[in-house]
Image: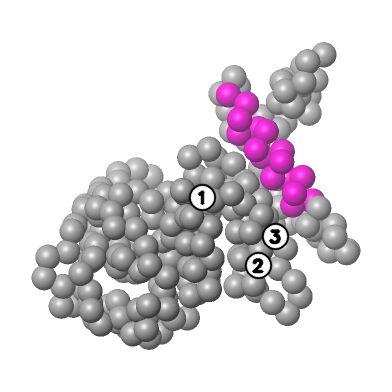
Amino acid sequence: MVSAWACENNLVLGQIKTAEKTNEITAIPQLLDILDIAEHTVTIDAMGCQKEIAEKIINNDANYILAVKANQAQLLEDVIDEFKFAKQPDVNVDEDLGHGRIETRTCSVITDFKFIENQKDWKNLASLIRIESIREFKNSDKATEKATRYYISNLEDKANVFQNSIRSHWAIENKLHWTLDVAFAEDASRKRNQNAAQNYSVLLKIALNLLKNEKTEKQGIKGKRLKAAWDEDYLMKVLNLKV
């Protein structure tokens, strides 16, 4: 299942099931076709870093930030080389303290680049982005973790804007996939027959949207779900129905 997640609203906007013998590359364009993405920014992980997907996003009057990894080996090499010789990239540093660790993320942005092979094939390419993260663990023997990630975008924004957009992308992991597993045990589901898995996934995401948008109860999704099962008045509130 490929899902579209609205970071600011904490909502699943749509989903597409990947056909047999295919993957996300074919499903993502179908999902984009059913969404109104005009004037919004679409962030996709490396699987979606495809020329056709970038073009479709632009043609739908939207913007893209695409992760670049080894599946686009030449592009990745070119982006890395650009940062090696960049003179004055725009830089933003962000520190996050919590959960027993300190994470420092340095975002660098280049808008003046010359050596991206077949640059015109990447629709309206305007910025190259690098995120360098260092994660240190307090009161722990765990070693410091370092990672470097690269992105491309049609936007010409400051480093702090890209920093926030890229970080918010990961909300789909901790606010959607992780929550569906913890609160609804989705990963343990054995539904396989015909359309059962897809239909069940739709129902879970509808339930998640409803529970997230019910603000009066100050507890987690799992607790809200349990209360809705026990308390019919609260269930009606979640469903926004008047008795």
Residue 189: x and y in percent read: 77, 56
Q: Where residue 16 is drawn, which disc sits there?
A: 3
Task: Report how far apart the C-alphas of labels 2 and 3 lie in the structure.
Answer: 6 Å
For the question of whether residue 135 can be seen, the reply is: no
- Image marks 2 and 3: residues in contact by CB distance under 8 Å: yes
Residue 56: x and y in percent read: 54, 65
- Dot 1 or dot 3, earlier in sequence: 3
Residue 208 lies in the magenta stretch: yes
Q: Is residue 48 left or right of residue 20?
A: left
Residue 235, quarter of the rendered image? top right
Magenta range? 200-215
Q: Is residue 191 left or right of residue 46?
A: right
Q: Is residue 70 left or right of residue 188?
A: left
Task: Report how far apart the C-alphas of labels 2 and 1 lie in the structure.
Answer: 19 Å
Residue drawn where x is 59% and y is 49% of the image: 36
Q: Nearer the viewer, residue 49 or 134?
A: 49
Q: Secondary structure at mark 2?
A: helix
Name the amino acid type tagged 2. Answer: Ala
Q: Is residue 233 above or below residue 141?
A: above
Q: Is residue 144 left or right of residue 214?
A: left
- Dot 2 or dot 1, earlier in sequence: 2
Query: Which residue bears the numbered disc 2?
Result: 27
Residue drawn where x is 65% and y is 38% of the image: 209
Dominant SS type (magenta): helix
Query: Which residue bears the numbered disc 1?
Result: 38
Question: Closer to us: mark 1 or mark 3?
Answer: 1
Residue drawn where x is 38% and y is 51% of the image: 165
Which quarter of the figure is the C terminus placed in? top right
Residue 46 lies in the magenta stretch: no
Task: Report how far apart the C-alphas of labels 1 and 3 lie in the structure.
Answer: 19 Å
Name the amino acid type tagged 3. Answer: Ile
